[in-house]
Amino acid sequence: MTRLLLAITLAAAPYLAGADTPPLSAGDLAAGAAIFERRCSQCHGLDGVNYKGPYLNGILGRESASVPGWDYSPALRAWQGVWTEDNLRLWLTKPQDLVPGTAMNFGGFRTRTEDRDRVIGFLMAHTP
Ligand code: HEC
């Protein structure tokens, strides 16, 4: 029994190490996927292809405005940030507040912080 528990703990360790937020439950992840589908997927892909916006697979930790072949707005090019979890929170709350003049035509989650955080969790799952 102890050995089994140890094996489970070790298997889970890489996902838990260094995480400053609790791991998402399967329910949160499914909710995040549904929110992405409804609010983001008309412009963004997770398959390395640019649609009406740059692809978002691998977005966590990526430098802003760095997808090859995507014609970013001068505002986002000038911003020169990194898409950390905190910056994504600010961006998705209200893009125009973080980067005034951005071409992303999305009003933001504003007060819907749970939806915002679920979609960020979902994006994390698409960052290797
Ligand atoms: C109407 C289309 C549209 C919608 C909807 C949209 N985006 Fe965007 N997004 C864009 C465009 C266009 C850009 C590039 C903005 C610029 O150049 O200023 C962008 C940029 C981004 C970036 C920065 C990418 C980079 O490479 O720096 C992130 C992150 C992002 N969007 C996430 C999201 C998420 C998450 C959602 C859903 C909650 C979403 N977007 C909804 C069009 C959209």
Image (cartoon, rainbow, N blue to C red):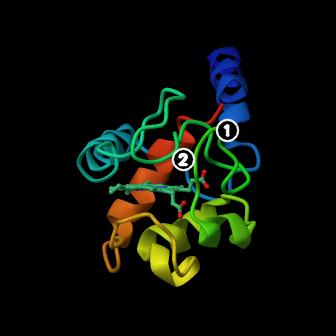
Q: Nearer the viewer, mark 2 or mark 1?
A: 1
Residue 92 occupies which quadrant of the picture? bottom left
- Left or right? Give the position of 61 relative to 5: right
Mark 2 vs 1, N-terminal side = 2
Amino acid on which the number 2 mark rests in the picture? Pro
Q: Which mark is residue 85?
A: none
Above or below — where is 91 with respect to 85? below
Above or below — where is 114 with respect to 9? below
Q: Which residue is mark 1?
A: 68
- Left or right? Give the position of 124 relative to 114: right
Q: Residue 42: horizontal and vertical position, in percent? A: 29, 44
- State the SS at label 2: loop
- Label 2 and label 1: CA atoms lie apart by 31 Å
Amino acid on which the number 1 mark rests in the picture? Pro
Q: Which residue is mark 2?
A: 23
Label 2 CA crowd tier, 10 Å (few <14, some 14–19, many 20+)? few
Above or below — where is 16 with respect to 5? below
Q: Residue 46: horizontal and vertical position, in percent? A: 47, 33
Looking at the rendered image, the quarter that the N terminus falls into is top right
Q: Residue 14: horizontal and vertical position, in percent? A: 73, 32
Q: Residue 109: horizontal and vertical position, in percent? A: 34, 71
Residue 37 occupies which quadrant of the picture? top left
Instruction: Out of 92 and 96, give the one closest to the viewer.
Output: 96
Instruction: Out of 22 and 62, give the one closest to the viewer.
Output: 62
- Left or right? Give the position of 84 relative to 116: right
Residue at screen point 54% across, 81% down: 100
Residue at screen point 66% across, 58% down: 83
Above or below — where is 80 with respect to 16? below
